[in-house]
Amino acid sequence: MSRDVNVPYCYYPKDFPNYAIKTSEPTAFGQRITIVKTQATYMPNEILNLTVDLIFETTQRIRIRIYDPTNKRYAVPIPVPAVETKANVTDYIVSLNQSPFAIVIIRKSTGTIFAMKTIRKKRSFLLSRSTFAGSGQFTAHWTGDNQATYENMYFSIPAILSFNMFGITHVGAVICGFSLNATEELCTRWMQLGSFYPFMINHNSIDAKDQDPAVFSWTAQQIMKQALLMRYSLIPFWYTLHHQAAMASKTIVQPLVSEYPNDENTFNIDQQFLVGRALLVSPNLKTLAKTVHAYIPQDIWYEFPSGVKLTSVGLFMDLDAPLEKINVHVRGGSIIPMQAPGPNLMIGRGNPFTLLVAQSASNNGTGNLFWDDGDSIGMIVSAFFLLYGVNK
């Protein structure tokens, strides 16, 4: 294969070739399309020909199968309903774009573009490492393959803050790092920090040592457990923030400068962040450190979950940060919905709610709660949800 001079092997040609339709034929179940790569790239072992089967299963359901017709490749063995004939009358229109190849499926009854959500009648969860402007409407995002280093743990904070400003709010970094071997101290600190990512994920390379909590000492397990319980206790707060992000384009996490734009001390802070407007997170990002140098903005702050009020604000200070502690503070004037944590989110949804009230200087507070069943589609349209505004 010829390639341009001085172009790395892994790079695409300048025109970024896509697949285009070669043939399209009706089948007993719907339609079969052959698509071909318009131009070979520099990637090794690429698939130049693919087959796309459109299977019209029922009036409301279409199945799309994309596969390599020449070489058998591994596929996730997901059971699908068996059909003997295609549906002759459907509530969807399938249109194809010739080049680049694309499938657009539109529901006749509403005119809206839809995905494969109607099979389970439940919400889908999409996770992507590769995203672009507007992707936040459809998918969560993780920041890619990082390394098990303190530097990478630190860089995760600017990453999640940046993606929130991009409108991709459900975002997180790989906790404990993807490559290299995480130490117990690093993984403990990262689990604490990751408990305050909008999206929390821990997985790593097959070549690296296991890094789930169970492989570490009992002491480390208990510290990680407490961090997770802290996160689970705040699920109603997180859920409300996600609702506000979806409906009002708000950020879920944000830099301090967003809330304190007139405070020059906040301009360069990238090792602390706010969850919503209510929680200030100041993680320990250095090995063997027993304190964290943090900025406390000019406001009223209470330590979470102890409730101890900070007496010094508007300055940088060294906060105690032993291994078992991540510094989190509640902003005065906030009312945070909380819930007794369960062993998992499905079981925990039925647990009692509480309100954490952090009084402001004028002894008042405000907060919100959005709550629905957590899984059904169209809850906003059907108005089957709770939305509370709380003032004290």
Image: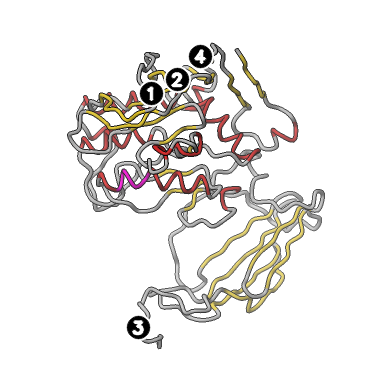
Percent across and percent down for residue 231 are 42, 27
User: Which of pointers 1 and 3 indicates the residue nearer the eye?
Assistant: 1
Q: Which residue is mark 4?
A: 359
Q: Which residue is mark 1?
A: 313
Q: Are marks 4 and 1 in contact (CB under 8 Å)?
A: no
Task: Give the alpha-carbon distance from disc 1 to disc 3, as whole Å.
Answer: 56 Å
Task: Give the alpha-carbon distance from disc 4 to disc 1, as whole Å.
Answer: 16 Å
Q: Which residue is mark 3?
A: 6
Could you tell me if residue 357 is visible in this image?
no
Q: Which residue is mark 2?
A: 300
Could you tell me if residue 219 is visible in this image?
yes
Q: Are marks 2 and 4 in contact (CB under 8 Å)?
A: yes
With 187 as the anchor, is 308 left or right in this view?
Answer: right
Task: Give the alpha-carbon distance from disc 3 to disc 2, as whole Å.
Answer: 58 Å
Task: Give the alpha-carbon distance from disc 2 to disc 4, as whole Å.
Answer: 8 Å
User: Which of pointers 4 and 3 indicates the residue nearer the eye?
Assistant: 4
> Which amino acid, mark 2?
Ile
* Image: 249 above or below 391: below
Task: Give the alpha-carbon distance from disc 4 to disc 3, as whole Å.
Answer: 63 Å
Residue located 23% across and 38% down the image: 286
Magenta span: 152-156
> Which amino acid, mark 1?
Val
Percent across and percent down for residue 13 are 47, 79
Question: Crowdedness of circle 3 by 10 Å Cα count: few (<14), some, many (20+)?
Answer: few
Which SS class for mark 2? loop
Percent across and percent down for residue 246 are 62, 40
The quarter of the picture where residue 44 lies is bottom left
* Image: 338 above or below 250: above
